[in-house]
Image (spheres, helix red, strand yellow):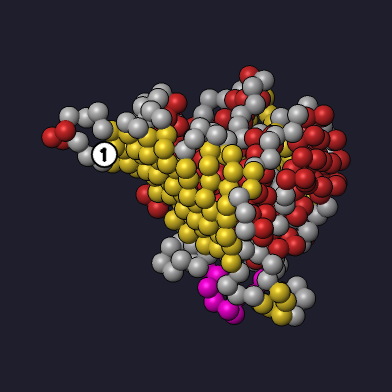
Amino acid sequence: MKELNIGLIGYGFMGRAHSNAFRKVGNFFDLEYQPVLKAVCGRDVEKVKGFAAKWGYESFETDWRRLLAREDIDLVDIACPNDMHKEIAIAAAKAGKMILCEKPLSMNGPEGVKMVQAVEKAGVPNMVWYNYRRVPAVALAKQLIDEGRLGRIFHYRAKFLQDWTISEDLPQGGAGLWRLDVKVAGSGVTGDLLAHCIDTAIWLNGSFETVTAMTETFIKRRKHNLTGKVEKVGIDDACAFLARFQNGSLATFESTRYARGHKALNTFEINGEHASIAWDLHDLHRLQYFDHRDEGRVRGWRSIHVTDGDQPYMGKWWVPGLQIGYEHSFVHQVADFLEGVAKGKPASPTFRDALETQYVCDAVLKSARTHRWEKVARAIK
Ligand code: SOE
């Protein structure tokens, strides 16, 4: 087994999710490459030191440029806030490192273009952590669609609902709350939550054609944790949009952090001419499937418990009936990436793939401003 030295930048929620995946992947998947937790980087020396000790990183850095300059780092994993993705990714590409980048790829499309150009010019393997594609039930949905079981697709319906920002007293900015600061996050629920739904939709249903959107910022001013002042809120708290796909299907997407009672209700439903499928993150190991070709007397929605060895990824885990969870989607994504590196065949979503999601987000936010239908930009050459 060849060792692949990881340099992680950022040690928040995603730093933990990725580290956990790097640690576990070799125990469950037979791979040519074994990730080695070489170094973690963060600005606060005490915190980064503590993280390194807790997660088993051999060393730590407090300046990401020093991490990139190290010859013993093969892969840079960008798990810090969105406003830093571009600069780090471009520098990492120039340094010849493989790159994994937390979603969304960038603050906006133009930034994403520069990142795609940098990794493609350097010829370094790259991928963006849109982890929900690797939930076994979602991967099973992809198989069923690709086998043509649904037939022509008429409708795609997606939601990502949360309720954690309803209080007016919640500040914006700083650790944990940078998602509410537009200068750091780029946008609100569109880039943070709908980007997941859009990525999954592109994967399952193909490219978008046009969108029309509305957004709202319910709480207009919040105290900023870093300045101590009450400042304007620039993010979209909620976003709903309609879309037309290139395959002719019609779609609705909705996301908010103001849906009381919903913690992370990420769902999709797809209606085709023969069959429909539905998935829900709160019940992530199940795929709902309805097939009109079933005998009428017993026709109905099937709730498929996706835990069998012949279902995506499940042969690597326990025995039939025993489910896995959220963290495993990250393990699967690392496994697919490492397999891709070994075979010289990139695993999706690459930076180029993720740029498509960025273009959809840009069109959605533009439409919310113009109140018009907007065309989604095509990929760069
Ligand atoms: C926001 O609350 C968040 O943590 C997103 O940033 C993640 O991408 C999503 O998977 C869960 O919700």
Respond yes or no on whether mark 1 lies under 8 Å from ligand 1. Answer: no
Which quadrant holds the C terminus?
Answer: top right
Q: Position of residue 141 (x, y in %)?
A: 41, 34
Q: Quadrant of residue 93?
A: top right
User: Would residue 365 be seen by someone viewing this image from the given angle?
Assistant: no
Q: Residue at x 61, y 69 (%)?
A: 217
Q: Position of residue 250 (x, y in %)?
A: 47, 42
Q: Residue at x 81, y 54 (%)?
A: 62
Foreground pick, 226 / 27? 226
- Tell me the amino acid under the disc marked 1: Arg
Q: Is residue 210 magenta?
A: no
Q: Residue at x 77, y 45 (%)?
A: 110
- Disc 1 crowd rating (10 Å Cα; few below 14, some 14-19, many 20+) is few
The magenta span reads: 164-172
Q: Residue at x 58, y 79 (%)?
A: 168
Foreground pick, 268 / 131? 268
The majority secondary structure of the magenta stretch comes to loop
Q: Is residue 102 left or right of residue 252?
A: right
User: Would residue 336 be seen by someone viewing this image from the given angle?
Assistant: yes
Q: Position of residue 203 (x, y in %)?
A: 53, 35
Mark 1, residue position:
302
SS type, badge 1: strand
Q: Quadrant of residue 189?
A: bottom right
Q: Is residue 88 left or right of residue 167?
A: right
Look at the picture and state if 325 lies above or below 170: above
Q: Is residue 169 magenta?
A: yes
Which quadrant holds the N terminus?
Answer: top right
